[in-house]
Amino acid sequence: MREREPEQHGDTTSMKVEITHFDSYPTYRATENALRQVLAEEGIQADIELVAVNSEEEARRLRFPGSPTIRVDGRDLFPTPEREDWRLVCRVYATPEGLIGSPTAQMLKAALLSKEGSSRTAGLETPVRVRHIHYLGDEAVEQVTN
């Protein structure tokens, strides 16, 4: 994945949000829905990419800590410790209700609003485009939806 250059203060371009996941662990859909809700409520502009990770090799290459993982402008919204065994695993989040397979809307909101520069988009309309990316070896197949 390529990382974006840090944004300048006052920049109103949208943030890039990636949800990396593997298809056999469907909690990424709950994460996507909660994320859309928070973005709309906060008026934050974002381009969302759903990135399917389909092999252990891809998990290592993408440094995938588990499904689902939310990255904003290339950084994990809920950072995990560095490790050597990046692989296809289910990720759980510590919520007020206990460990579950996706962060709550409140957790997403707090994490997004704590990101430096997130206030630069407050009050703007929220165009959200979703890119579905599936890796097949070194080749990426992409589908864009609004």
Image (spheres, grey):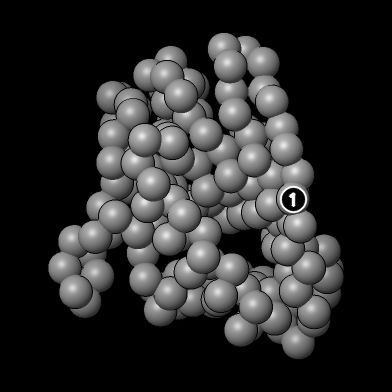
| Of 61 and 116, the residue lying toward us | 61
Position of 27 with respect to 11 (left or right) is: left
Q: Position of residue 131 (x, y in %)?
A: 69, 45
Q: Residue furthest bottom?
A: 123
> Can you say which quadrant of the picture contains the N terminus?
top right
User: What residue is disc 1 on?
Assistant: 145
Residue 102 in percent (x, y) is at 35, 59
- The image quarter containing residue 96 is bottom left
| Mark 1 surroundings: few (<14), some (14-19) or many (≥20) residues within 10 A | few
Whether residue 81 is visible: no
The residue shown at (82%, 64%) is 13
- Of all residues shown, which one is farthest toward the left? 98
Q: Is residue 28 visible?
A: yes
Residue 56, x across and y down, in percent: 38, 19
Question: 78 above or below 110?
Answer: above
User: In the image, what residue type sits under mark 1?
Assistant: Thr
Residue 91, image x, y percentages:
29, 46
Q: Is residue 135 left or right of residue 109?
A: right
Q: Nearer the viewer, residue 79 or 93?
A: 93
Please, is residue 146 above or below residue 110 in the view? above
Position of residue 29 relative to residue 82, above or below, is below
| Residue in the image at 56% along x and 75% along y | 37
Q: Residue at x 19, y 74 (%)?
A: 97
Relative placement, left or right, of 127 versus 27 is right
Outermost residue toward the top?
Answer: 137
Q: Residue at x 64, y 34 (%)?
A: 133
Residue 31 is left or right of residue 50, and the answer is: left
Quarter of the figure that contains the C terminus = bottom right
Label 1: which secondary element: strand
